[in-house]
Amino acid sequence: MAKTTSPQKAVLIDDELHNALWMIDFLQSRGLEVLTAESANDALALVKQEIYRLLVIDLNIPVLPPIDEAVAAKGATNYARFPGLYVAEAARNAGYRDRQVILYSVHREREIADIAERLRITYIMKGRPQEIKKEVEEVLAFDPTA
């Protein structure tokens, strides 16, 4: 398990950040600097730089060349349809511990829930800010990589 290298930073990955301003405010109120990304490409670049305290990833984000082919090769049904899943898996493979990665979406897909469970990441529905806040609080309360 990799050490959290940026414990005071969180990353919010969502192509509609205007709908997630409440989450940015919430994360900042917990003392975190919030970095944002609006595509899978930008998110992967951030994930490769550091191991941040927390990643919150929208399931349905744009993916652009050149990584669109890698995402499609992973699976058209889940990964190409929901590129946030690709980012979440890349984060886990880069050393992020399970609860450092929160996947959220308006879609409730059984297959995605199964993959999230296999990856041991949190999968929460958008529109449930109390659940997201509770999960963030629990993640911030304990960091076994410290």
Image: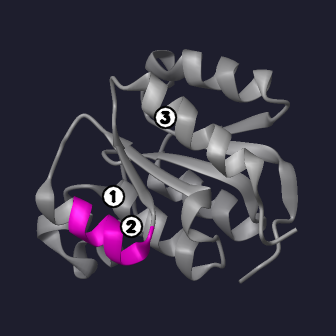
Q: Looking at the picture, which amino acid does disc 3 mark?
A: Ile
Say which residue appears at 44% left-offset and 33% top-offset: 131
Name the main secondary structure of what is drawn in magenta. Answer: helix
Which of the two marks, 3 or 1, is nearer to us in this view?
A: 3
For the N terminus, the quadrant is: bottom right
- Counting residues from the start of the chain, the first of labels 3 and 2 encountered is 2
Q: Is residue 101 visible?
A: yes
Q: Which residue is mark 3?
A: 132
In this rendering, is residue 1 above or below 129? below
Gap between marks 1 and 2 measured at Cα? 5 Å
The percent coordinates of residue 95 (x first, y second) are 66, 78
Identified at 80% across, 72% down, the residue is 145
Image quarter hosting the C terminus:
bottom right
Looking at the image, which is closer to me, 38 or 117?
117
Mark 2 packing: few (<14 Cα in 10 Å), some, or many (20+)?
A: many
Q: Earlier in the sequence, mark 3 or mark 1?
A: 1
Circle 1/circle 2 CB separation < 8 Å: yes
In the image, which residues are magenta? 113-120
Q: Position of residue 62 (x, y in %)?
A: 36, 47
Q: Decide: is 113 above or below 3.
A: above
Q: Within the image, what quadrant is residue 85 found in? A: bottom left
Compared with 51, 109 (above or below) is above
- The residue at 65%/63% (across/down) is 47
Tell me the distance, in whole angstroms, between the alpha carbons under discs 3 and 2.
20 Å
Q: Is residue 7 magenta?
A: no
Q: Secondary structure at mark 2?
A: helix
Residue 83: which numbered mark, if any?
1
Q: What residue is shown with label 2?
A: 86
* Callout 1 amino acid: Pro
- Three-letter residue code for mark 2: Tyr
